[in-house]
Amino acid sequence: MYTSAGTEITRGFPLNPKPGESTDHRHQVGIWLNYGNVNGLDFWGNGSEGKWGVRSGQIKHLNIEKMLVEDGSGSFITNESWIDSVGNELLAEKTEYHFMASGTIRIIDRITTLTATRDTVKFKDTKEGMFGIRVARQLQLPTKEDIVLKEAKGGTTTVKAMTNDDINGNYRSSEGISGEAVWSTRAKWMDLYGSIGDEKISLIVCDHPKNQSYPTYWHARGYGLFSANPLGSSDFTEGKEILNFKIPAGKSTTFRYRVIINSGADLTNEEINSFSDDFASKY
């Protein structure tokens, strides 16, 4: 993912590693939508252990159904299949992508509809989801200590401290919370801002009022994981709330997210709210 100036703002590892990048969580690649516990299968891990095990799920791309370019914007529709380790389909996915540009601002709207094609599909509460981005090292939050993270499937992952002078990211939410404290909080939108070289960058993700659990919980970490998770209530509330979301057989649900990328001065709350309101009224 790039700014209008051509600066890449997603981590390169493991597909296109860059000097000085962290190498934790190799499944956190670019920008994605998946989940860590779907009928007991892990789609979040994306085969990160090097092979697809019996408890792993895979999202298989099927086709591009439609592409359209008009009035300075573009869109396309894709079809995917969420399958288990032997190829049985749990969910049919249809996703619309809409791309817009205005000056230094780039916008991506993702509208994903999931249909339970055979049986009821259960999304057990877990922090490992759902609409995520792994950002470039410069947009991480500075830290002087290693971070030890508990993994949903057991064990821990250590993220080494990155205190280089060029690491300068910070979060702020629609609810006025900032820094590492945004993790597990709910908000209508989240802004990750910082600089890469001399370029000031804002990366904003907006939730949608029609989404489950709006305003969403944020699985947003200082080490560069920036994720909206509407389904992980138990992990984010220490068990005080439990959702265990389900899609009944033959039924569908839709998740809608807007990504805003700005090159230049950080957007104001008023500007972000305007983009968020436009998104809410559009779909």
Image: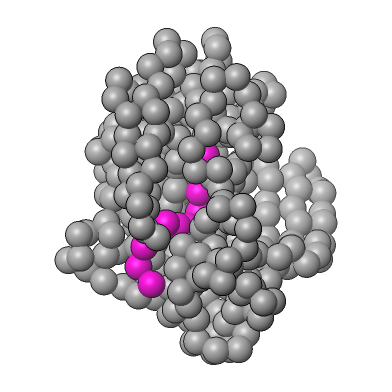
State the residue lying farthest toward the left.
Answer: 240
> In this rendering, is residue 48 above or below 243?
above
What is the x, y in percent for residue 108? 62, 46
> Can residue 279 be seen from the camera position used here?
no
- Quarter of the image with the C terminus is bottom right
What is the x, y in percent for residue 120? 50, 87
What is the x, y in percent for residue 163? 38, 17
> In this rendering, is residue 107 above or below 279?
above
Residue appearing at x 20%, y 59% in the figure = 238
Q: In the image, is 196 to the left or to the right of 153?
A: right
Which sits in the foreground, 71 or 55? 55
> In this rendering, is residue 111 above or below 265?
below
Residue appearing at x 47%, y 57% in the figure = 130
> Can residue 123 be seen from the camera position used here?
yes
Residue range corresponding to the magenta coloring: 124-134
Residue 128, magenta (yes or no): yes
Q: Quadrant of residue 101?
A: top right
Residue 259, magenta (yes or no): no
